[in-house]
Amino acid sequence: MEIKCSYCKQRLEEEHALWDRRHDKYFCSYECLDGWQLEDPKKNGVAREEVGHHTMVCHHRE
């Protein structure tokens, strides 16, 4: 099965794809926030979803 980022639709290798269980979405990468709150979920044109202490991020969104 081909996996694509839910935001930029870029094809992801299975071992690099990050899956957000709650929203059933895939992301390009993640950042660890250590519990910090995000000021703006779409800041700098980057799509983000919080998953525990990790924030799933799409770096390719325009």
Image (spheres, helix red, strand yellow):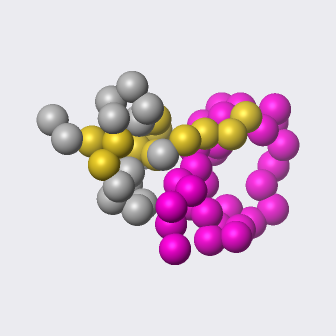
Residue drawn at x 40%, y 62% is 8
Residue drawn at x 40%, y 44% is 26
- Judge by depth and name the residue closer to the eye, 21 or 30: 30
Eyeballing the image, is 30 above or below 38?
Answer: above
Tell me residue 27's x, y (percent).
Answer: 46, 46
Eyeballing the image, is 15 above or below 29?
Answer: above
| Magenta-span inclusion, residue 54 | yes
- 41 left or right of 59 in image: right
Residue drawn at x 51%, y 61% is 60
Residue drawn at x 41%, y 35% is 17
Eyeballing the image, is 36 above or below 45?
Answer: above
Eyeballing the image, is 4 above or below 62?
Answer: above
- 34 left or right of 15 in image: right
Tell me residue 55's x, y (percent).
Answer: 64, 42
| Magenta-span inclusion, residue 61 | yes
- 32 left or right of 20 in image: right
- Magenta-colored span: 33-62
